[in-house]
Amino acid sequence: MRRRDKLAFKLRVVIGTLLIGAIGFCLLSVSLAAKEKIIYMSTPWGVPSKNLLAEFEKQTGIEVEVTTIGDEKALRDKVMIATAGGIAPADVIFVGITNVGVFSSGRSIVQLDEIVSPDLLEKLTGADLFRIGGYLYSVPIYQQLVMIDYDSSVLEKMGAPVPTTWEEFTQLCREIKQKGIRKYPITFGARAWSWYLIALSMGGVLFDEELNPTFHQPDSGGLGAMKLLRDFFEEELISAERITSVNPHPSFWAGEAVFHQAWQGSLTIANNPETSKIAPNAKYILLPDEHFTWSLPAALGISAFSNKKDEAYKFIVWFTKAEIQKSLYEAYGMFPANKAAFAALGEAGKIEGFDVMAEQARFVRRIPYRAPWYTEFENEANDTIKRMVRDQISPEEAVGHLANYVYELKKEYE
Amino acid sequence: MRKRAPLQAPSQTLRMKIRNKQKWQRSLSVIIDNQKWLAYLILAPVVILIFFMAYFPAIQSFRFSLMYYNTRLPERIHFVGLNNYVRILKDPLFLEALKRTVYFVVIAVGMILGIALAFSLVLNKSFKGRSILRALVIVPWAIPPVINGFMWKWLLSGDFGFLNGILYQFGLISSYKPWLKDPFMALNWATLTFVWRFTPFVTILLLGALQSIPLELYDSAKVDGAGARSCLWHITLPLLRPMLTIALIIIMIFAFTVFDEIYTLTGLDPATKTLMMYGYELAFEKGRFGIGSALAYVIGIFMFLITYSYIKSIYREVKY
C-alpha cells in the first residue's frame, strides 16, 4: 500500500511538472500568435520613433520589434551568423550600401523584384544601387553623399577663404594649429572611408571597370591620399585618438575640430544646438581638387529565412512614405529616398547647404560595394591604414599590400 | 439464502488488457522506484539542452573546420580535410596574433600574481579598516569586462583622458599624450586593463589560502629566530603554492581567451589583435567560417592543455 502511494506521488510529480511546462508553452505560443509581429534589425540611425511605430501598428495590426545594432559592421556579423545557421536574424534588415554585396551573395536577403511594385520604386531615388546582377535586393530608404563640413566661425575670424585644393586645405589647417585656434583642426578617422574621401576628391579612380586596383599606381590619387592621410596624423592635424576611435563626428560636434568628414544632411545635427557646440556655424565645402566623392545610401531588405515576408513588405512600403522619411531626416540628417519627401523638405527650406550639396552631387564615383569581396577589402584597408599612420609601413607599402590583397580576393571569388 | 451468481471468467481480450496494464505499471514503477533511472529521467531535459546549446555547435564548428566555408560563397562550400588547419599554421597573421597573445598572457600572469600576492599579504594582516579594504578590493572584479574596457578607453583618451589630466596637473607631462597610438604601448595598456580587473579575484583566492595557514607555524619559526623574510620564503610561499598554481592556470585560461576588454578599448586594432580576436575577425568579420572554426579548434587545443594541467593540479592538491 505504502509502495503504491509512493509510486502515485512520484507519478503525480512527474506528470504535474510536464503539465505545468506544457501549459506554460501553450500560453506563450498563444500570446505570441495573438498578434502579428515582425522584427526589424537596424543601426540606430535607421529607426523611426516609437510614436511612428505605434502608428504603423494601429494602421496594420503588425507590431514591430526593433533590434538596434551599433553599426553596420556589427549588423553584418549578426546577419551572416544567422544565415550560416539558416535562421532569420530579423524579418526586415537594414542594408547599408556596404553590405548589399555580402548579403546578396551570401543569400541572407531575398530578391525583391516579384514582391516590390514598380510604382513604389518609381517614387524612390537610388534603387539601382541596390540591384546586383539585375536583381533588386533592397528598397532604398535614404540617399547620402560623403562630404566635408567645417566650422565657418573659425575661417571668418581668420579671414581665410574656403580651401579649394588639398594643398590649401593642409596649409590652412597648419595655420589653425600653429595659431593655437584648434589643437587638431581635422577630424577624419584612420580608416578606409577617409582614404576614399581624399583619393576620390584628388581625382583618383580606385578601381578600373574590371574592379582591378588602380590606387597603387605611382601617380594615383590612392597613393597620394595615403601619403596625405599619413602626414595629417604625423603633423598632428588629426588627433591620434582617431586611430582607435575612428568615428570622426563627436569631436567635431564638441567643437574640437574645424574640418570634418561628414555626410549629406549632417548639418541637421551639426547646427542643432542640442547636439552640437558649433551650431549654427557648420557649413559644407565642395570637396577640394577634383571634387569627387562617393555615395553611402541605405535600404531595407527582407530576410531569406523570414516566414513573414508579406508583413515585412508592408513595413517597407510604410517606411518609404514621405512622413516617415522626413522624420528620419529631422532626427538623423538622413536624406529621404522618397522623391516627394525630398522635394517637400527643399520647398520648406529645411535643407541646409543645398547649393553646395547640389554641386557636390555632380561629382560622384562608385566604390565596388556590389563585389562580394568588398567588405573583406574594406576590413583589410582599415587595418592597413592603422599600421601606416603608426609608421609601421610606408604609404607605398600600404597601397601595394592592398592591391595584392584585391588580386588574391578576386582570384578566390572568380 | 440467495445464491450468488457464479463469477464469470474474464474474456481473453480483457485478460490481455489487464496483463498489459500491469506490465506497463511494473516497468514504470521500476523506472520511478529505481533512483538511478529517476535521476536520468529528471536530468534528461537539461542534458538535451546542453547538448543542443554547447556540444552541437562544437560538433558543427568542427565540421566547418574541415570545409571551405565562406559565407559570401555559399554555393562553393566543400570538404577540404585538414587544409584549413595547415593554412592557419602557415598564416603569418596567425603567428603574429599568437606572439601577441603569448606576450599578453606572460605579462598579465606575472603582474596579476605579483600584485595579488602583495595585496593578499597586506590584507591578511590585522589593521583598522581591513574589512572595508577587503570589500573595496573586489570592486574591479565585479565590473563587467565591456564596462571595464570603456572605462579604460576614457581614462586613456589622448584628448580628454583622466590619466592625461592627472599627469598634466602634476606637471609630469607637458602636453596630453595619445597613449594608444604606439602599437606596443597599446598592447601593454590592453594588458593592464585585464590585470586591473583580474587582480582582485586572485587576491581573494590567495587571501583564503593565507588564512588557512596555521599561525602556530609562524610562532614556532619566530621562536627559532626566523625573520619576516624567512617566514615568507619558507612557510608562506610553499604553503601557498597549490593555490598559486590554480590561480596561475585560471589566469592563463582567461588571459588566453580575452576578448571583451580589448575589443572595447581598441576595437579590432592590428596592434592588439590576440588569437581570439583574430578568430572572431576571420569567422564573423570576413565570413570565413571554415578557417575561423579551424582557428577556434587550435585555440581549443591550447586551452585543453592548460585545463588538463589545471585539473591535474587540483587532484595533486587533494592528495596534499
Image (cartoon, coloured by chain):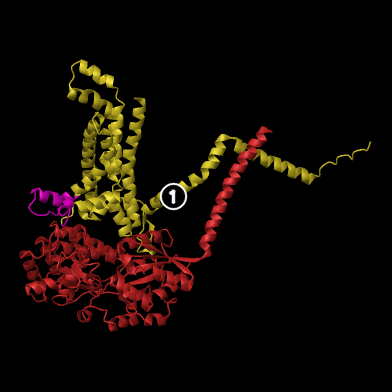
Chain colours: A red, B yellow
Where residue B310 appears, as percent x and y from the top left, is 33, 35
- Is B167 included in the stretch rendered in magenta? yes
Q: Where is residue B318 shown, x and y percent of the image?
A: 36, 27
Total tally of numbered discs in the picture: 1
Q: Is residue B180 left or right of residue A295?
A: left
Residue that label 1 marks: B53
The answer to whether residue B90 is seen in the rendering is no
Which residue is situated farthest in the top direction here?
B224
From this viewpoint, is residue B205 visible?
A: yes
Residue at x 25%, y 64% (from the top left corner): A378
Magenta segment includes B166: yes
**Which residue is nearer to you in this view: A377 or A49?**
A49
Where does residue B315 sit, x and y in percent of width and height? 36, 30
Compared with A276, B152 (above or below) is above
Q: Residue at x 86, y 40 (%)?
A: B7
Q: Counting other residues with Cα less than 10 Å from the Cα at mark 1, is it few (<14), some (14-19), or many (20 or more)?
A: few
Placement of the N terminus of chain B among the 4 image quadrants: top right
| Front residue of A76 and B75 | A76
* In this rendering, position of residue B44 left or right of residue A269: right
Q: The disc numbered 1 marks a residue on which chain?
A: B
Q: Is residue A398 left or right of residue B6?
A: left
Q: Residue furthest front?
A: B128
B140 to A175, vertically: above or below: above
Give the vertical position of B233 relative to A176 (above or below): above
On the image, which quarter does residue B283 sit in?
A: bottom left
Residue at position x 71%, y 43% in the image: B20
Residue range in magenta is B159-186
Residue nearer the viewer, A280 or A7 = A280
The picture quadrant where one finds residue A331 is bottom left
User: In which quarter of the view is residue B244 placed?
Assistant: top left
Give amino acid for label 1.
Answer: Met
Q: Estimate the x, y position of residue B201 in percent, counting from the top left.
A: 29, 39
